[in-house]
Amino acid sequence: MAAMMKAAVFVAPGRIELADKPIPDVGPDDALLRITTTTICGTDIHILKGEYPVAPGLTIGHEPVGVIEKLGANVRGYREGQRAIAGAICPGFRSHACQDGHPSQDGGPLGHGYKPMGGWRFGNTVDGTQAEYVLVPDAEANLAPVPDGLSDEQVLMCPDIMSTGFAGAEAGNIRIGDVVAVFAQGPIGLCATAGARLRGASLVIGVDGVAGRLEMARRMGADVTVNFREVDVVEEILRLTGGRGVDVAIEALGLQSTFEAALRVLKPGGTLSSLGVYSEDLRIPLGAYGAGLAEKNIVSSLCPGGKERMRRLMNIVASQRVDLGPMVTHTFKLDDIVAAYDLFGHQRDGVLKVAIKPS
């Protein structure tokens, strides 16, 4: 009889439950990671609500920190017992998209089962990380050893939200001296704020409606914070920039209202870097877009993955240029995953990120 493990599985919309599943068999290119810490993402809440479809019975989660339990025969450069992470996006680096320089889009050609989150496998197309063990596919390309001295909590943001938030700053092509506005200071927006500062922005404006998140935004690098419940955000940002507008606006929520506000505060020739996961069609207002003549750019990003991306992010943490540990506001045992989902999904008690620990 196969050895069993505990795992949080999607049952139906509104139901994610703890279940017993077999510990995965390790193929030649795989690695089995014993999870020491994982977390819940906003995308998992979309899954829970039925807004993003996954197969019933799938283990959810895509942010693994753990210890290598077993290596496949073909996997080189690692050892069993080594602490490691893997990105939420686990590209195989063999697809057309990977070879074309877009490994996050690791799917087939358009019209052949391609999905716009094709490289996202954990908790999407294969069993994920909210479990005692996870099978890491294409392990040699995706496992990244954790540097000595870094805690699980310090590197927990690297697999997804740190990589995603930083990608928003990178895709916006922030230059030294730029003015940047980051709309929404949830976990990804906070990482985008930190990324904007690291990229050399001279003024970072953080926008949110929750006082605690605005305070955290200042810790992460925001020079000024704007509470949308107290002021007209577009008017306030135009005032702060002397009517010039921002060089880069990062949208990190996924709503029409924040997307439109981000577009309205852009200078002519500026860039809107979109990180939000949208659940309905977006509209681009004629005036905000300058009727297509204002040279405004709209770009989008999906969390870059692979071991080199993870190494770079952990180097940033190790160098103490950013400390994302304070974003972990709550800790739960895997046995209490349903309660963790309830807290995180309803955004109670000032929650930003939760640490889920199987042991």
Image (tube, helix red, strand yellow):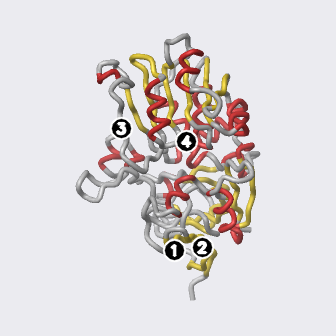
What residue is at 43 percent from the left and 70 percent from the top? Answer: 55
Q: Label 2 amino acid?
A: Glu
Between residues 185 and 221, which one lies in front from this camera angle? Answer: 185
Q: Earlier in the sequence, mark 3 or mark 1?
A: 1
Residue 70 x %, y %: 59, 67
Question: For the residue labelled by badge 1, is the local secondary structure a helix, a strand or a loop?
Answer: strand
Q: Earlier in the sequence, mark 2 or mark 4?
A: 2
Front: mark 2 or 4:
2
Q: Is residue 289 depicted above or below 338 in this figure? A: above
Front: mark 2 or 3:
3
Question: For the residue labelled by badge 3, is the local secondary structure a helix, a strand or a loop?
Answer: loop
- Residue 283 is tagged as 3
- Residue 163 is tagged as 4
Residue 136 x %, y %: 52, 61
Report the Cα–Cα distance between label 4 and label 1. Answer: 29 Å
Question: For the residue labelled by badge 4, is the local secondary structure a helix, a strand or a loop?
Answer: helix
- Is residue 43 visible in the rendered structure shown here? yes
Between residues 265 and 66, which one lies in front from this camera angle? Answer: 265
Q: Is residue 265 depicted above or below 123 in this figure? A: above
The residue wearing badge 2 is 17
Which quadrant of the rendered structure holds the N terminus? bottom right
Label 1: few (<14), some or many (≥20) within 10 Å? some
Is mark 1 in CB contact (under 8 Å) with mark 2?
yes
The residue wearing badge 1 is 11
Q: Label 4 amino acid?
A: Ser
Is mark 3 in CB contact (under 8 Å) with mark 1?
no
Residue 251 x %, y %: 50, 35
- Residue 237 is tagged as none
